[in-house]
Image (spheres, coloured by chain):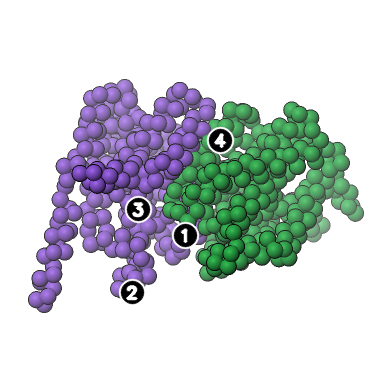
Chain colours: A purple, B green
Amino acid sequence: MDATDKGAPGVLDDFARRHRLGVVEALPWLVAIAAYFAFPDYLALGAQILATILFALSLDLVLGYAGIVTLGHAAFFGTGAYTAGILAANGWGEPISGLLAAAAAAAAVGFCTGAIVLRTTGLTLLMQTLVVAAMLSELANKASRFTGGADGLQGMDVWPIFGAFRFDLFGRTAYIYCAVVLLICWIVVRSIVHSPFGRSLTGIRENMLRMHAVGAPVQGRKLVAYTISAALAGISGALIAQTAQFVGLGVLGLERSGTVLIMLIIGGVGQLYGAFIGVTLYMIAQDRFSTIDPVYWYFWIGLFMILVVLFARGGVLGLVARARRQLRRLS
Amino acid sequence: MGDLLSAAISIAFHGLAFAMVLYLISVGLSVTMGLMGFVNLAHGAFAMAGGYALTTLMNHLQLPFALALAAAIAIVVLASFVLERLLYRRLYGGDELDQVLMTMGLIFMTVGAATYFWGPVAQPIHPPDLINGQLHLGSRDFPTYRSFLILCGVVLVTALWLALERTRFGAKVRAAVDNLRMAQSIGIDTSQLFALTFALGSGLAALGGALGADFLPIVPGYALGNLVFFLIVVAVGGLGSIRGPFVAALVVGTADTAFKYVAPELGAFFIYALTMAILLWKPHGLFGRA
């Protein structure tokens, strides 16, 4: 008893320290506020970036913390987008409840498919997740009565937020709406990864065998993380659907799963802020390239990705960590 | 009854032809993934390059089919050899996320480059008269080109099997797949082996892509659009084998043809469900080792 009492404060201090907000952590939000005033013409793009950051953040929870490599995260993004979209197209355009419904639907899909696919690892897991998303995409394509099929879902009517803030043409409401939702979800994710539950996820990523040996319920924890991540991805999809007032089949596609993975890797995996950096970089680059070169921008973004692999291993945050180590060595 | 039989024969025939294309493209991916543990998502780009090289050499330089095919394969083999030395080998044994990022980058670059040079429209392949038209067998007609595909597939499967089982090179590849470090310690030059296998696999993919334009049209989005098919063949077959992807390609090819015939409105859904079921039953693929 005594021993644990003496040992516990050290561990608790460690957890408390991790939970404490650092000064640097205010930076993304200051940038988001500054961007609102600095780029009034780009708020629609800004809203998209904010919503996609949430998508990448949800992927970071499973990939970066629980070590689940997935190529099918669009399954949950798309489920959320279609849920919010179909609600709004059928007479229920209240956005907040739309988000919650999207989260619930995506969580349900995540829980059911996760219970099956999370038993495997490596290439098999990659394939299972990919196939789940592909199956949902086929279903959405065939159920065109509800989803609009290949033409996309049209006729969404999203009501003003709280009945007061109408979605405007310039994307002002959309930007603030996405920023607030992202902030709330970020606090949730941050609390999760620094909690004992989050630490056990990292343990599973680092050494699954040992986690089994110490008696951690590995499958259960992975499934819980997967379900939470699915819910967050669903919210992200719903945000995109509500702000764009349109849902196309692409929300479930392999390209969507692939690009969010790419954005996260570019930023840095498993560090909570890789999503912020990677998504912003990628989507601004994509926007610029596609404006300069609307047909061939794929080539440039591909080149950019290869350069990141060659010269910035570990993404932007990897670069920052290396630079800091260099500086410390110099001083 | 007669209708049913004729449908079954037709499905088997077209399914077999599609399976050969899938096999030619995917076998290289299976071997390189088994050998180097490298997730090469851009493998389909080599197949696409084979298709573009063939059509360009035939339609613009007016080369005969056989010569253009050989030249197309040679070009892709050379290009893949250079890429392996310059890019891929830096990431062997590295983080698989870096491999995903790099190969996805390559896919995006090929999409952009193909759009730039050939535009978004599918490139037509004009096979010579000898293998065009219809083949009369008994009371039935079969497209000659697809019969030719099946023949090519059978010949290549046999050749590959012999090469892997009967030659010194094949023995080295098998040794390295089984135990890489042991193979290195007994003096096998695995770096050279990787380069050769990679180039060979890409060459086969180029052949498959060029011949299979009938099934998988040569468009800029080829590598990404068909990636699921190639990965399914590799995962279902099991990594690092020659036989696994063959059986998997047969299963996927005939099942896809059959499902499209029986229930076209559900499209590829059944293939995905089948893949899911097989991987749940055998997580390491039909012929993979745990």
Q: Nearer the viewer, residue B2 or A286?
A: A286
Q: In this picture, is B187 found above or below B74?
A: below
- Horizontal and vertical percent position of residue A165: 24, 30
Q: Image quadrant of residue A87? A: top left
Q: Which label number is shown at residue A213? A: 2
Q: Image quadrant of residue A215? A: bottom left
User: Real-space Cα distance between discs 1 and 4?
Assistant: 27 Å
User: Real-space Cα distance between discs 4 and 2?
Assistant: 47 Å
Three-letter amino acid code at disc 4?
Val
User: Real-space Cα distance between discs 4 and 3?
Assistant: 29 Å
Lower position in the chain sequence, tag 2 or tag 1: 1
Residue beneath the point at 56% across and 35% down: B111
Crowding around mark 4 (Cα neighbors within 10 Å: few <14, some 14 to 19, many 20+) is many
Q: Are marks 2 and 1 on the same chain?
A: yes
Q: Nearer the viewer, residue B17 or A172?
A: B17
Crowding around mark 3 (Cα neighbors within 10 Å: few <14, some 14 to 19, many 20+) is many
Report whether residue B190 is seen. yes
User: Real-space Cα distance between discs 3 and 2?
Assistant: 22 Å
- Secondary structure of the residue carrying tag 4 is helix
Three-letter amino acid code at disc 1?
Gly
Residue carrying label 4? B111
Chain to which mark 3 belongs: A
Residue carrying label 3? A64
Lower position in the chain sequence, tag 3 or tag 2: 3
Three-letter amino acid code at disc 2?
Ala
Q: Are marks 3 and 2 on the same chain?
A: yes
In the picture provided, is A144 more to the left or to the right than A52? right
